[in-house]
Image (tube, helix red, strand yellow):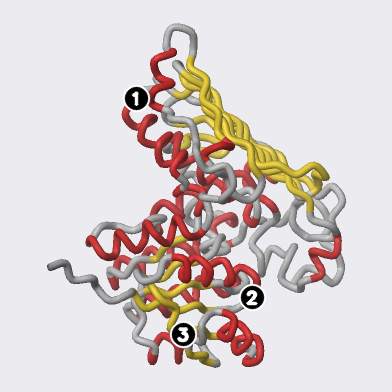
Amino acid sequence: MTITPPPLRAGIIGTGAIAHAHASAIAELAPHIELVGVADVDADRASEFAALFGGPATYDTADRLLAEADLDIVSVCTPPKTHTPLATAAMRAGVPVLVEKPTALSLAEIDELVAVHAETGVPALTVFQHRFGPAAVRLRALAREGALGRPQVATCETLWYRPDDYFAVPWRGRWDTEGGGPTMGHGIHQFDLLLSILGPWAEVTAMAARQSRPTDTEDVSLAIARFDSGALATVVNSVVSPRETSRLRFDFEFATVEVEHLYGYTDADWTFTPAPGHEHLADRWPAGEDDAAEISGHRMQFAAVIDALRGGGEPGVSIADARRTLEFAAATYASAFRGRPVAAGQISGDDAFVTRMDGDGAPWAPITGVSA
């Protein structure tokens, strides 16, 4: 007789827009997980959210949720400046925590989380859901196996559009509260997937600009990256692009693999082109059957986390993986603002880019009323 384990007890801190994606994913994965509690400083918003998602208990503080709800996992869905203190509180309470991107505002902050994880042994995970779609999982396996040959060239583009009024939310567009512009808040999903496929990066050369948005941060950045494997990649992050798209292309020795989507891909969004003489590799890339559902969303990552927590494995995306991605963002800013390449591991010690993504300051003047 098979005994079904009770559902994991999940909580959510912050009930704004992105929390709906977490709650929906949890609901879709029943009976493996259930939402039992939510916390928000806005009691009315918490109550409305709870009513929409099955009536979990509501709490006026994260500390009360962590202390009273007997959680197995908690999501942090608050503005970026609060991510590190809330993730720290969850780990110290013994609750595995899944943090929306960016995990932290700086390398110094994420190193605090690394230290707390080492001290407590409690997982601190980051929402990088694009790693978990079936096509990305398949590509990662083929790349690690070496079936596609050596990676040579890659392109990663997050070309999105956010109007000026998007930045009317007080914490957006500020280094001290959002951490950066599209490099930190938008393109990070795409280049995290790029890094998960290509492996360790060695050096970044970048440029950044504030073209037109009313922000202190950049609204465009471009980077050229060299990887330990020898592969070269371009990474473009923008919030000033009227025709929006998210695109990644990987050129291996024996095949090109690419995906174009917007905020989530299906198998049908991917194409696989074997090089001449390697047509047999097409058998390793079955045609996608699901043309509608966005299968690279939060549900796929939650499902993987549940499996890992149930099976005693390490859930993804770990704090160590998240740090490598955040370091790539920091290197992009450091190279762009200092006008020279930045090597992996170079940003350390008392370097200004350890504590702030704008380092000693962006090369453009701050906008009055935006900066702290």
Q: Check contact, mark 3 vs mark 2: CB within 8 A.
A: no
Label 1, on which residue?
Answer: 146
- Quadrant for residue 355, please give it: bottom right
**For the residues marked 3 and 2, what is the alpha-carbon distance in whole angstroms?**
15 Å
**Residue located at (54% from left, 57% from top):** 354
Q: In the rendered image of this protein, does residue 41 appear above or below residue 192?
A: below
Q: Nearer the viewer, residue 364 or 34?
A: 34
Q: In the rendered image of this protein, does residue 108 appear above or below residue 20?
A: above
- Quadrant for residue 175, please give it: bottom right
Give the mark nearer the N terminus: 3 vs 2: 2
> Circle 1 — which element?
loop
Give the amino acid at mark 1. Gly
> Circle 2 — which element?
loop
Q: In the rendered image of this protein, does residue 61 appear above or below residue 308?
A: below
Give the amino acid at mark 3. Gly
Whether residue 65 is visible, yes or no, is: yes
Label 2, on which residue?
Answer: 16
In this rendering, the label closer to the viewer, 1 or 3: 3
Assign the N terminus to one quadrant of the image: bottom left
Whole-percent x, y for residue 90 in the image? 41, 78
Give the amino acid at mark 2. Gly
State the residue lying farthest toward the top.
277
Q: Which mark is residue 37?
A: 3
Left of 21 or right of it: where is 173? Answer: right
**For the residues marked 1 and 3, what is the alpha-carbon distance in whole angstroms?**
45 Å
